[in-house]
Amino acid sequence: MKQVTTVFWITLAITLGMSFLGVMAPEGFENISKTIMNYISVSFGWYYLLIVTLFVLFCLYLIFSPYGKIRLGKPGEKPEFSYPTWLAMLFSAGMGIGLVFYGVASPVSHYINTPPTAEPGTREALEDSLRVTFFHYGIHAWAIYAVIALVLAYFTFRHGKPGLISATLEPIFGDKMEGGWGKLIDVIAVFATIVGVATTLGFGATQINGGLTYLLGIESSFWVQLVIILIVTVLFMLSTYTGLSKGIKYLSNANMTLAGILLIGTLILGPTLYIFNSFTDTIGAYLQQLPTESFRIAPHDDEERQWVLDWTVFFWAWWIAWAPFVGIFIARVSKGRSIREFLAGVLLVPSVVSFLWFSTFGITGIDEQNKGADIAGLPDEQALFGMFGEIPFGIVLSIIALMLIGTFFITSADSATFVLGMQTTNGSLSPPTTVKFVWGFAQSTIAAVLLYTGGLQALQNALISAAFPFSIIMLLMIFSFYKALLKDKKSGPDKIK
């Protein structure tokens, strides 16, 4: 443990302290964290809409600008991973369990329970349900990840800086980033990572439990979820021991194989033509309303504004809170790619796959809902399995889904231990196994304790609140990156013309 920095001990203490609050006073902690989260959401909803749209525009500008040909590495350096493996890794880290958890639940809920503006259950609500799901999981979400990943990869692989968020701000603040301010920034990033992953482990355990409840009648309880967490912890620790080029690489490829089988199986066994028609129609509606939706805050309609705060602003804050983890991991596996191919890959490919995923599972769920099944009445963690129960070979698909949740679960935890190891060993690109094991054990323990006490929601609220200061750090990262690009343009080893 000699390699760890003070960031390790500070963040571990803060995270354990907040988890202790979640255990000792779950209701009080949840009320306080929810009050803070709601205040930020109501007062700064407009700010979240503006900055996330700025991230999208900045990424698009770089794709089409001469800067796009700059390589994230030394001139002529080749990518470390093949395209399929690279895309599988970033997709597994970026969405993973979320797609499986909400693939059916989100579109069906927006159709029946929480449509943006239309009456529930109407054709307008159906059309909006898929479009807003595309919006929340599409280009905007991936632009948030892309900004962090791009800036970090640029400074790490092209300029030889440590793989730390603080190191990307040196062009603005200079040596100050090596002192207390730099440590503060890295602590925020590490805190967001460990809490985000602990929350996801909680979600993953509840969904696997939900699937077992729906299929086998196994009760939904903490003790079942604890066993699930223990099994997954052992598996991801084994993967962590094998390193990036084996464990995470193989798991990510396995994820995409299982996800592909599940997607194609549901596409064939579900209402295939209806799915393709809805996918095509919603792509058009999404692109057509993208500018309006990006800035929609509805100042003259209290009900509509509340929906935007509850959903769009929540999602933007959630993705920003997740950005340190996902962005740092994507940066680590993107060495050798040009800015243009990096951004095209990170923005477009996962977005299109997500659109096809939500069209397939969402429309199948909505179709079964309209036939009489109460998919909307099921808990979110059971919606997928409830939908499978209504189509042919549903048991087979449910088993594949459980396997996929498990592999996504393991990959997320494994990726997080790698990122946490990097961030607490001064940006080491190959952090010590001991440090990764400590973080792996910590995040599993936190997830289990918070599931037991019901404090998971409170920690999630705290995480989303932490997104606000981190969004300011992201803006500074963009400015620092652009400043370095201008310098590269004049004196870099492969000058831009």
Image (cartoon, grey):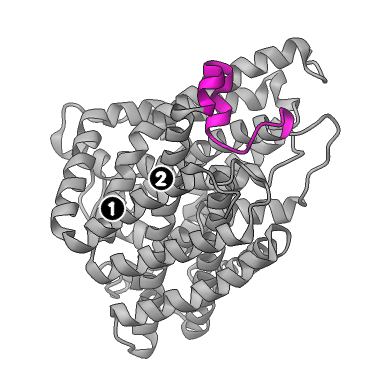
Magenta segment includes 240: no
| Residue 341 x, y percent position in the rendering | 71, 36
Q: Is residue 188 above or below residue 216?
A: above
Q: Residues within 10 Å of mark 1 (few under 14, many from 20)?
A: some
User: Furthest residue to the right?
Assistant: 76
The total number of labels drawn is 2
Along the line of sight, which residue is nearer the eye, 440 or 10? 10
| Residue 34 x, y percent position in the rendering | 19, 47
Quadrant where the image shows the N terminus: bottom right
Q: Is residue 337 above or below residue 386?
A: above
Q: Which residues are magenta?
A: 157-178
Picture quadrant where residue 481 is located: top right
Element type where label 1 sits in the image: helix
Q: Residues within 10 Å of mark 2 (few under 14, many from 20)?
A: some
Q: Residue at x 28, y 80 (%)?
A: 221
Numbered circle sitting on residue 98: none
Quadrant where the image shows the C terminus: top right
Q: Is residue 168 above or below residue 312?
A: above
Tell me if 273 is positioned left or right of 211 in this view.
Answer: right
Q: Is residue 171 above or below residue 369?
A: above
Tell me if 13 is positioned left or right of 425 in this view.
Answer: left
Along the line of sight, which residue is nearer the eye, 330 or 21? 21
Element type where label 2 sits in the image: helix
Q: CA distance from mark 2 to mark 1?
A: 12 Å
- Of labels 2 and 1, earlier in sequence is 2
Prevailing secondary structure class for the magenta stretch in the rendered image: helix
Can residue 385 be seen here? The reply is yes
